[in-house]
Amino acid sequence: MESAGIDERHDARRHHHFVLVHGLCHGAWCWYKAATALRRAGHRVTALDMAGCGAHPARVDEVRGFEEYSRPLLDAVAALPPGERAVLVGHSHGGCSVALAAERFPDKVAAAVFVAASMPAVGRAMAATTTDEFLKFVEEKPDFFLDTKELVQSNPEIPGHPVIFGPNFMAQRLYQLSPPEDLTLALSLIRPANRFNEDPLMREEKLLTEEGYGSARRVFVVVEDDLGIPAEFQRRMIAQSPGVEVEEMAAGGADHMAMLSRPEELVELLLRIANKCCD
């Protein structure tokens, strides 16, 4: 019934192309509810697996750097037909990949949307804002990562260690308001992943420029009940990027996995953001 309402409210508006990017250890599968609702409303949706994630064939130790990890998104945006601009939607760690794509192809980005996501600032290394400062922030919260495990790095060419989220961490920090069936699904599908916070690209202070990433329309969706990236830290990232538009998913139902816990509300927000590109 609610999906039919979305169809009716947005039927007369321009159709958009949404490119959806998952977070750490996840895959395109986590967008299944939002992607279905957007397609039902007549929009084009591309939900991607970053390299070594979801159904992507590479193993975690075969993906040597952040650019290679983000290659499915970079290739998808590069392949957009001349004149087409997509709405890039990054969730959690996927925000870094969205930022990189917006830097490389600003003319192909109608909006870069960060849903409780890592949002780097122009003129700062991506890892500084999204990893270093976040890890310092959660140091104040004992046992924040609970049973998340840091794994042995089997490829010496990749700095750092891959991680895999633990079931307690997922249940208590990421999926605490999501249907239990979605947590069960996630526990069967997550894969180890590298943060790439020591990757030279993630440490390059001049990577994100005003002319590239900074020229793209950027929108941050604050999720108030997120326990994975708490709203306080979300607002810290926003404060480092003047001019970013802010939308909110108010307290009362959305957890870190907003696309699973409150898919209809998130889809409404995404459509409102996309429609502003055409006003």
Image (cartoon, grey):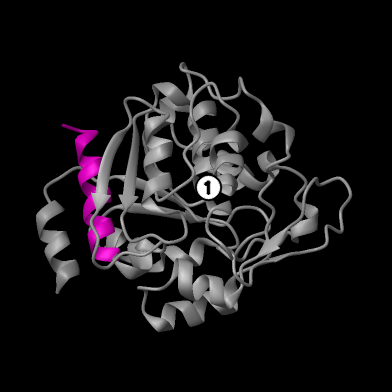
Q: Residue at x 36, y 64 (%)?
A: 255
- Where does residue 153 sit, x and y in percent of width and height? 83, 57
The residue under label 1 is which amino acid type?
Answer: Phe
The correct choice, above or below, for 193 with respect to 236 in the image is below
Q: Is residue 182 magenta?
A: no
The correct choice, above or below, for 60 with respect to 67 in the image is below
- Where does residue 221 sit, x and y in percent of width and height? 32, 47
- Where does residue 238 sit, x and y in percent of width and height? 38, 35
Q: Is residue 266 magenta?
A: yes
Q: Is residue 268 left or right of residue 105?
A: left
Q: Residue 131 sits in which quadrant?
A: top right
Residue of label 1: 137
Q: Nearer the viewer, residue 18 or 160?
A: 160
Q: Nearer the viewer, residue 26 or 274?
A: 26
Q: Residue most toward the right?
A: 156
Q: Which residues are magenta?
A: 263-279
- Where does residue 263 sit, x and y in percent of width and height? 30, 65
Q: Is residue 85 visible?
A: no
Q: Nearer the viewer, residue 237 or 39?
A: 237
Q: Is residue 251 left or right of residue 105?
A: left
Q: Residue at x 49, y 40 (%)?
A: 98
Element on which disc 1 rests: helix
Q: Principal SS element in the magenta part?
A: helix
Q: Residue at x 29, y 45 (%)?
A: 16
